[in-house]
Image (cartoon, helix red, strand yellow):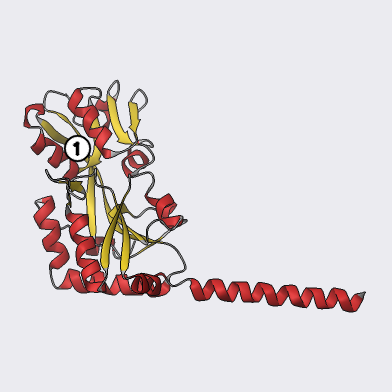
Amino acid sequence: MKKLLSFTRKAAAVVLGLACFAQAAHADALADIKARKKVLVAIDLGAPPFGMTNAKLEPQGSDVETARLLAKDLGVELEIVQVTGPNRIPFLMTGKADMVISSFSITPERQKVVAFTQPYGASQFVVAAPKGENIKSLNDLVGKRVAVVRGNMQDSLLTPIAPKGTNIVRFDDDATVTAAIISGQVDALCTPNSLASAIAKQNPSKNLETKFAIKDIPYAIGLRKGEPALEKWLNEWISANLKNGKLPGIYQQWVGSPMPDLAQFAAK
């Protein structure tokens, strides 16, 4: 009986070891991408100027161009996996996407779940509202309806610091937040400054303007943890394309201003 029990334990250990070995051997997303000859990149196409569609419903924006450059340098085809802010992580973790390139801000909460590359850009989060709204600081948000994307960066930044009496209205994505401010359903919105500028440009009659800034947050490429080969390749790719000016050029083209100095985030 003891011999049988010992044998069973050893067999179980061998099976477990083989399973772990197989999992470790399979955990190479970079090799999978190259073998597939296609990279699946999650991008929110409802978040201009990072991701959007043109009149022909073709994807465009700074994150789209970044993904195209990445796929070209990888030597594979690009497949854009359309996501919203809240489902970027679920799509990544369930294997529907190999990585997230979607103004994906680096936060401690997200770092518990996914891995991030070094930053390839940064967003300044602001509160914006029509010119007629008397909003100059956080205290002026009392009694105001302020739109944010549910569970997204702007929600995480504004909710803890908003004064009591602020009515934070949560929507599923940037597209519905934009519709809410344009229709007058809300008085203001918290969003990246680049998105606020894009909304203002597309809807000049609304006289939307930035009222005040909250915080600068770096964003990076998100990937599943335990993928050292892919993470190394991506970090080297970002470093090279920051240095040669291609990534700053894409940012300038779509955001309309120079890329922030990413050195400020180096120690974070």
Q: Quadrant of residue 28?
A: bottom left
Q: Quadrant of residue 259?
A: bottom left
Is residue 120 rendered to the left or right of residue 117?
left
In the displayed structure, 53 sits above or below 262; it is: above
Residue 176: image location, x then y, percent: 27, 33
Name, please, the residue furthest toward the left: 204
Judging by the rendered image, the residue that carries numbered circle 1 is: 212
Is residue 113 rendered to the left or right of residue 175?
right
Please count the marks in the image: 1
Residue 258 can be seen in this image: no
Q: Residue at x 25, y 24 (%)?
A: 186
Residue 136: image location, x then y, percent: 18, 31
Q: Quadrant of residue 218?
A: bottom left
Q: Residue at x 20, y 50 (%)?
A: 50
The three-letter code of the residue at mark 1 reads Phe
* Within-10-Å neighbours for mark 1: few <14, some 14–19, many 20+: some
Q: Residue at x 22, y 24 (%)?
A: 187
Residue 13: image location, x then y, percent: 72, 75
Along the line of sight, which residue is nearer the eye, 72 or 227? 72
Along the line of sight, which residue is nearer the eye, 222 or 191? 222
In the displayed structure, 197 sits above or below 189; it is: below
Is residue 46 rendered to the left or right of residue 152?
left
Q: Which quarter of the rendered picture does the C terminus lie within?
A: bottom left
